[in-house]
Every structure is written in structure tokens, then in C-alpha cells.
Amino acid sequence: MQTRLVEYFLALEREGHFARAAALCHVSQPTLSAGIATLEAQLGKRLIRRDRKYGGLTPEGEAILPWARQLVAAAEALGQAAETARGPLRGELRLGAIPAAMPAIGCLATAMLERYPGLNISVRALTSRQIERELAAFELDAGLTYLDFEPPAHALSVPLYAERAMLVSAVGGVPIPAVIDWADLAGLPLCLLHQGMQNRRILDARLAERGLALRPLVTADSYVALLGLVQQGRLCSIIPDSHAALLDGLRWARTAPLPDMGEGSRVGVIVSDSAPMGPLAQAVLALARELRLPPGFTTI
Amino acid sequence: MQTRLVEYFLALEREGHFARAAALCHVSQPTLSAGIATLEAQLGKRLIRRDRKYGGLTPEGEAILPWARQLVAAAEALGQAAETARGPLRGELRLGAIPAAMPAIGCLATAMLERYPGLNISVRALTSRQIERELAAFELDAGLTYLDFEPPAHALSVPLYAERAMLVSAVGGVPIPAVIDWADLAGLPLCLLHQGMQNRRILDARLAERGLALRPLVTADSYVALLGLVQQGRLCSIIPDSHAALLDGLRWARTAPLPDMGEGSRVGVIVSDSAPMGPLAQAVLALARELRLPPGFTTI
DNA sequence: AGGCTTTATAGAGCGAAGCTATCAAGGAAG
DNA sequence: CTTCCTTGATAGCTTCGCTCTATAAAGCCT
């Protein structure tokens, strides 16, 4: 059983296209074609449906998919473990973070770089569900997400900070009181994240508990977009205090804390709990445990 | 990264001897030697200490050991999954059981064979600790052991039956009362398992709670040995009721139930919870859930 | 010193995996 | 209907690496 062939299989499954998968594996298309054929011959089963075109996995292909991932991840980790048994950590650390946690990733990534020179870090903004899926598929080494809402299974976590919501408005724009009550929110001209985004779901749930509902005038899918809207002065918005920290020093923005949303907004690092833990995951977890976030983040 | 080479490495680690490891892998000794050298070259690290003799693993070797196991297990499971995606289960099911649970393994193994013809089953008697270790090292597919005493981590379990202790004596030998109290035990001429064996530890713990201690005249490491001693008529012993069920119909033996030892003697099937579950483990777990044990076993 | 055990080395054979070049089958567009 | 383009399979060749047998070298034991 050649790890290489299994990598071809996984690449093909991801790309759904022989030539692109081959390019991803840095081999020619006939090589990948032959590799898949060899793998199928060794297993005695057809794994890919195809006649002149890629047509998805057969049931057997689906059945081996988790094991194929496990195999490749183990091979990868084996190499990592050998390389870093002693000596510094090397290679690429793949981090995923929900948008709300992006400001904190700077802190985490910088600390990792500082402690482990020679490390490369790749950060991607993902939904909490994507983070869960990619951790399970070994396509991420660690994630930064909510720990309490819909916590992923088979994961180890270290809390980093507690998120609180802040109301933000432009100076000279929508006037906002210094102290805000839940009921005040319903009367403000708001722009918020789309319904369905996790952060919005949490906010809605908190308000629903109190019999309230928000009617934002604008919805968007990024905090940058919301801040752009707020800057115009016609709207105000609700953002995590971690983002509010980024605004610190901006002259046009005013923020006011929302009432405590209660427990359950902890944000932290998670890694996959399956199998022995890779050196990268171990390092991230260890660092997260010691990490002191700058002021602006509510420590737990 | 060739799975084959990693298998060589694991075999060598198990055997501590190049030629024996080579035989285990069905290759010649130079082949294994070269294979280890290739693996070391690919990883860029020395994995095995050796100068004219095997000298154990280097730190790097130790570091990759869990990943090596993971890799080989994933490769194995991949083959299994492909073969059994549809169609009957094939291959070898490796079961481990504590001695006390041996009588029940007949039931489990038979049911597996009946449902999955074409399956081969290998049963080994192990201590509960060995079962835990070998499950983690992917050298067992499932185990049969106590679920409540020192339960292993990272394992899924299905309870099968509750074990109760029985006093056994020979007809015409040591007279035993029909109803036994804890205090009675101290006065009987007993033979028991060695101290340190888990079953004995449990029994001792139960008695210690009541301020009692047993002074067996003979200790042994198997129930068969104990029964042989009992048959002589000079001693009586304490065995699990699962073994007592085997004696049913024997003319020389008499049994009497001990007082309830309380909760916590559940015996059941456990499988490793790491990674996706292999088809063998899935099948065993599913069957254990439906299994109806014959009379003589206390259902839960 | 001689024999035994244990690991490493040498050289040959063979199979598997890589490449380039080309073909075959659909689908889209003229 | 023809032509072109996309997509995957095939052919033929080369190279690389695993495997074998045979043998050497280095300790250990008597």
C-alpha cells in the first residue's frame, strides 16, 4: 500500500478532475490515472466512477475515504514527528478561524512564530462547521472558534478569551447611550451579520430569550463591511469586543458595551482528539495555555 | 512513504531482532535491514540504535512509534473497508479477553462466525491492561473485559453481562452452607487467583470494605488450576458465575452464590475509539448490542 | 583460536511508477 | 453535419528501488 497512490485518490476526490488533481500532486495526468488504476487493482474494487468523465466515488470509494485520510495524515505526522523529535518545529501550521476570532489569530500566530522560527503559518477564515470538518479530515492542524456553542466532537480545546458584544456607532452619527439595555437595541438602526452566521445566531438566541427580535436594516457577511456601513453615520452595529479592540484609537468610532450575554461565548483553540497528537497540534495547544492576550480581550 | 517499510520498523520494534522481524514479515534479513536503512534515509534520522546488535529505538524512533502504528492500522483498515464495503466480512478478527470472561467469548465468537462466515477469529487471554495497550496499538480489534474497574480511556463499550462471584466446592469435600455471608469466607480453606490479578483485586477490595481479608492456602493464575484443586476435595474456591455455568451438569461440583458484590462488575466488549471505526470493530459492537447470552450469565 | 550469532554489503533481477506522445469519446459551436 | 475542445485512457520507454542470494565483518562464547 503506497501512500502516494492514496494521496492521488484524495486529491482526485477533492478536485473531481484528473488533470487538476495530477497538477496538485506534481505529476502528469497519465501518472495519476495509472496510480488510481493501480490502487483499484490492489484493493480489488473500483473506487471512482468514470467513463470519459469523473463521476464521483463508488460506495467502496466512500467507504475507504476516512481511512485514506487517516493514512495520509499518519504518514505526514510520522515525518513531522521524526523531524521534530528534537530540534525546532518546522513545516506549515494550518490554522482555521471563525471571522469573529480573526483579531486574536494575529496574537496566536505571532507567538507561534516567535517561539518556533522556521515555522510557516497558513490562516484561513472558515465557518465553525468547516473548521470541524477540516480538522476531522486532517486538513487543518488547529482551529480558533467558539467552544460552547455547538462544540465539535472529538476535539481538545483550550479557552483563550471570552467574547462580549459591543455596540458601535460613528461619532456624530447615530447617538447611542453610554449604558445599553437589551430593549434599547430594538429601536436602533442596525446593520448586522446575515442570519445563519453563527455569531448572528448567538445574538438572536440571546434576544429571543428575552422576547426581543432585531430587525437590521442591512446585513452583511463580514465585520469590515459592517464597519464601513457604520462609518457612514446612518447605522450602528454590534461587533465582538475583539474587533472593537482593533478600532481603538480610531477617531470616528464610539463603542459601548452590551449587557453581559451570559456564559458561553468562550473562544479558544481546538485540535483534533483522534489518534496521537501531532507535534504541531501539541505546540499550539501548549502555547494557547500560556498565551496572554493583549488588553481588549476579556480573559476568562 | 511505503507502508511496507513502516511494517518492518514495527516488527523490529516488537521482536528486537533483525532476523526474527524479517521472518515475521516474510522477507529475508538483508531486505529488512535495507528497508530500515531506506526508512531512516527518507526521514533523515536514525531510528534504531545498532552496532552489531539491536540496541533499541532512538528518541526519534520512539517519537514516530505511535504514528507508525497509526499508519499501518489505517492501511489495514483501508483494505478491510474496501473489501467489505458490500459483501461479507472477511479476514481475521483479533479478540482479547480477560480470563474471567473466557466462557463468554465462546458465545460471542460463535455468534460472529455464524453471522459472518468467512471470518477467522483469534482469541487471546490477556490482562485488562494488556487489552487496553493492544487496542491502542491496533494489535487487537476488540476486547472483552470489565467495564467499571479501571476503565480504559479512548474506548467505546457495550455491556454484555454482570459478573457475580460463586463459591465452589467438591461434593463430599469441604462442606459449604447454602447461603453464604461475607464473614463465612474467612473461615474456609480457599484457593484463589494470585494477588495482583484484577479479579482478585476486586474480591479483596469488596472484603476490605467490610474489614475482612482472605488467606487462601493456594493461589494460582487460572481458573482451571483452581478447579483442579477444588476437585481434590480439600479446598474450595471463588469463581465468576460465568465459569460456574461451564460446570453445570458436572457431578463433583457444588456451587453457592456469594452475597451481591454490588454494582461495578459489568463485563462487556470494548473497541478503540480513535479514528473512524473499522468494519470489524463495528460488527463486533453491533453484534454485542443484540447478543443474548445463554442462561447462566446474569443479564444487565 | 575456532565456531556461532548477528548485522551490513554487493550485485543481479524484476516490477512498479514516472514521463512524453497519442488516441478515443463526448459535448459545444459553427 | 463537421470541427474543435475537453477529458480521461493507452502505448512505449526509462529509471528507480525493492527483493533476493551470497558473503563479509564484528562481537560473544567456549
Image (cartoon, coloured by chain):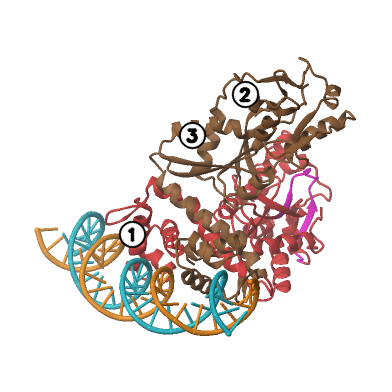
Chain colours: A red, B brown, C cyan, D orange
**Horizontally, is A31 left or right of B269 in the view?**
left
What subunit carries mark 2?
B
Instruction: Name the subunit of mark 1.
Output: A
From the image, state whether disc 1 or disc 2 is nearer to you: 2
Q: CA distance from mark 3 to mark 2?
A: 24 Å
Q: Which is more toward the observer, A169 or A220?
A: A220
Label 2 amino acid?
Leu
Asked if residue B6 lies in the magenta stretch, the reply is no
Depicted B82 relative to depicted B162: above or below: below
In the rendering, which numbered label is found on residue B112?
A: 3
Q: Amino acid at mark 3?
A: Met
Furthest-top residue in view? B178
The image shows residue B70, relative to residue A179, as above or below, that is below
Q: Nearer the viewer, mark 3 or mark 2?
A: 2
Instruction: Look at label 1 and name its amino acid.
Output: Ala
Q: Residue furthest right?
A: B211
How much space separates mark 1 and mark 2, taking CA atoms? 57 Å
Which element is circle 2 on?
Answer: helix
Instruction: Give the class, few, some or many, for how many residues have Cα within 10 Å of label 1's Cα (few <14, many ≥20).
Output: some
**Residue wearing tag 2:** B247
Viewer-nearest residue: A25 or B18: B18
User: Which mark is first along the chain, 2 or 3?
Assistant: 3
Which stretch appears magenta?
Answer: A250-268
From the image, tell me which residue sits under label 1.
A37
